[in-house]
Image (tube, rainbow, N blue to C red):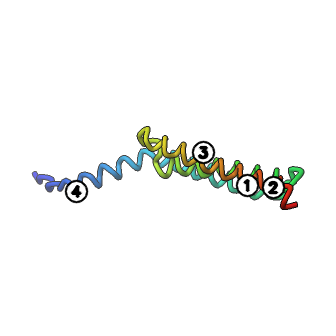
Amino acid sequence: MNNPPDISPAQHETEQYAHDVSKHVRGYLIVGGTLIFCTALTVFLSYVNFGSQKANVSVAMLLAAFKAGLVAYIFMHLSAEKKLIYRVLLFTGIFVFALFWLTYLAWYDPISH
């Protein structure tokens, strides 16, 4: 009877990691398919006129924000992070929203028109 070879700790960790990833492959494929669909939707919506350029940009930014959030949540593993990460992410989101708001206000600046 042959005894199985001894498995080193590093090799055991590699096998465990590969096993953990294989459980999530279906979810990754679903998210990847969703991103491909959203990209096709972005291309389709680029040919739709929503009444003004500002509305077109707003729709594009909302869809882009959704895709970026999906990538961050799933592929950057934010779904398993601690509360501190979400606090930093919330601050970053508020900062980005403030920059978008400044851009929105610049569109209606009476001095530049």
**Amino acid at circle 2:** Trp
Helix or strand or loop: what does disc 4 sit on?
helix
Label 4 Cα neighbours within 10 Å, binned few <14 / some 14-19 / many ≥20: few
In this view, the residue in front, 14 or 91, is 91
- Direction from residue 110 to residue 29 in the image, left or right: left
Residue positioned 41% across, 49% down in the render: 22
Q: Which residue is mark 2?
A: 107
Helix or strand or loop: what does disc 2 sit on?
helix
Real-space CA distance between mark 4 and mark 1, rounded to the nearest whole angstrom: 51 Å
- Direction from residue 57 to residue 69 in the image, left or right: left
Label 3 Cα neighbours within 10 Å, binned few <14 / some 14-19 / many ≥20: few
Which numbered mark, 4 or 2, is in the foreground of this view? Answer: 2
Real-space CA distance between mark 2 and mark 3, rounded to the nearest whole angstrom: 20 Å
**Amino acid at circle 1:** Thr
**Amino acid at circle 4:** Ala
On residue 10, which mark appears? 4
**Amino acid at circle 3:** Ile
- Direction from residue 41 to residue 98 in the image, left or right: left
Given contact means CB atoms under 8 Å apart, are the residues at marks 3 and 4 in contact? no
Q: Which residue is mark 3?
A: 94
Of mark 4 and mark 2, the one earlier in the sequence is 4
Given contact means CB atoms under 8 Å apart, are the residues at marks 4 and 2 in contact? no
Real-space CA distance between mark 3 and mark 4, rounded to the nearest whole angstrom: 42 Å
Of mark 4 and mark 1, the one earlier in the sequence is 4
On residue 103, which mark appears? 1
Residue positioned 81% across, 55% down in the render: 107
User: What is the quadrant of the C terminus in the image?
Assistant: bottom right
**Count of numbered circles in the view:** 4
Label 2 Cα neighbours within 10 Å, binned few <14 / some 14-19 / many ≥20: few
Given contact means CB atoms under 8 Å apart, are the residues at marks 2 and 1 in contact? yes
